[in-house]
Image (spheres, helix red, strand yellow):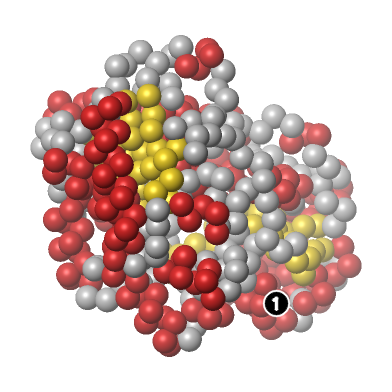
Amino acid sequence: MVQKLKVPKTDREKTTKQASLLMINYYFPPVKAVGAVRIGNFYKHALDYFQNIQVLTTSNQEIFQQESESPEFESVNFIPTFDFRRLLSFFQKNVTYFSSQKKKHPLKKLIIRLIDSFPLNILIGDGGLIYILMGYLKARKLIKEQGITHIFSSFRPYSDHIIAYLLKLEFAHLFWIADFRDVQVDPNRKNILFPSFQHWCNKKILKKADLITSVSKGYTQYLSRYNPNTYCLNNGIGHLQTSKSEQNPFSKFTISYTGSIYPELQNPNILFKALKELIDEEKIPEHEVQFILAGRDQEVWKHWLQQYGLGKILNDQGSVPRSQALKIQVKSHINLLLSWSSSQLKGVLTGKLYEYLNAGHPILCIINGLEDPEFEELFEEFQAGMITYNKDSELQILKDFLHSNFTYWKTNNIIPQFENYQGLERLQWAKLMEHLMYECQISKAKENTPVSLENPV
């Protein structure tokens, strides 16, 4: 099955290198997943640097939710797959994941940790053994026929990295970029069994990579234990918004959250406590405020809101297409971002952060845990809103932030934009890819010398 990405001829003419890329990505557009957005952006902007791009992805695309508005892609090879997601779909149609409520069950927790751990993560986890073997055989053929020079694989799942590892063993000339949207051994989530063994497996596999990329400096530093050649490739922004001024804000003061959550790690309680006090103090009328939820985990959010007597302000949109989620973000007065941080791992910069930055409206970031300097630097650079850490000592500052934004809207009937919105240009994917390609060149020359953690400027 072949799909085509319609790219302007001028963009294709930028390609000057005689190089060909093989992308190995289980989660690939139009699958409805934040990770697929990163992969789609990588593909689109890699076209400027590679004369030929081939893609390996899963035949499971048919059982996943898909974005209705998605570009088409060329040379996509669908690999036969039998994994636990396919198995779940047999029991209940269109169900390929455990909900947050089900994940709380001790047995479900154990099953998930087993599936995320070596060796089950490559046997029956996303992808699975059939996907790995069939993907490897297809990739060998493409390498010989298409003159592949570079391979790009991205976790999750680990199956993609295993295919790339096997290819690197056979074809030493390949330049392997091993990308991480998450870390496999997450000390905050405690998502695996036998951490020491998992670290050992990662080191054995990833030492073959020419470059390890990840979404944040915190993750990149963490992953350098496996291979010193690391590089921070942020999730980035496709194109800066140009029509925000034409987007009228919601008629109610709106705080929105678009996406899924990890209830055991993310905690919005300080927001709802502050909002409840402002309503009780009659500084924000309850009938003029709403909390829009666009995503899964409705029962978790209902519980959080009802704890503070705020059930009436919930506007549950359910799971919506990405295009609709982006419209909600642009029309919202405040976009809520939930993250977490610890001494062992910081820099949980999700793809949602960059969507919120692109919307250009105040972001309220609530971090559960220790202060995260990477978040602090970004918010300071762009004057993007407010960061708080679920401490009672920060409650009044948060109340002031909410009240000032409410008052500004009531007075001016508009939502304020970041002071340094144009500075976001450095986070556009075209810029990120340009710097990555430069780093690939110098890392090849450096051989075993560690690559700088910072992006070139």
Please give the name of the residue rendered at 55% of the width and 54% of the height, measured from the top-left corner: 62
At label 1, the amino acid type is Lys
Q: For mark 1, does the 10 Å Cα neighbourhood hold few (<14), some (14 to 19), or many (20 or more) residues?
A: some
Residue 431: image x %, image y %? 45, 27
Please give the name of the residue rendered at 35% of the width and 13% of the height, measured from the top-left corner: 16
> Can residue 194 be seen in the rendering of this structure?
yes
Q: Nearer the viewer, residue 399 or 65?
A: 65
Q: Reply above or below: 338 against 41.
A: below
Please give the name of the residue rendered at 28% of the width and 70% of the height, measured from the top-left corner: 120
User: Where is mark 1, residue-wise?
Assistant: 302
Left or right relative to 61: residue 167: left
Q: Reply above or below: 376 against 305.
A: above
Q: Reply above or below: 452 against 228.
A: above
Please give the name of the residue rendered at 54% of the width and 76% of the height, measured from the top-left corner: 91
Left or right relative to 445: residue 312: right
Secondary structure type for disc 1: helix
> Can residue 401 be seen in the rendering of this structure?
no
Q: Reply above or below: 209 against 391.
A: above
Left or right relative to 387: residue 213: left
Residue 448: image x %, image y %? 10, 37
Q: Nearer the viewer, residue 180 or 163?
A: 163
Residue 7: image x %, image y %? 55, 22
Q: Quadrant of residue 387?
A: bottom right
Residue 137: image x %, image y %? 26, 44
Q: Quadrant of residue 454?
A: top left
Q: Nearer the viewer, residue 120 or 287?
A: 120
Left or right relative to 35: residue 149: left
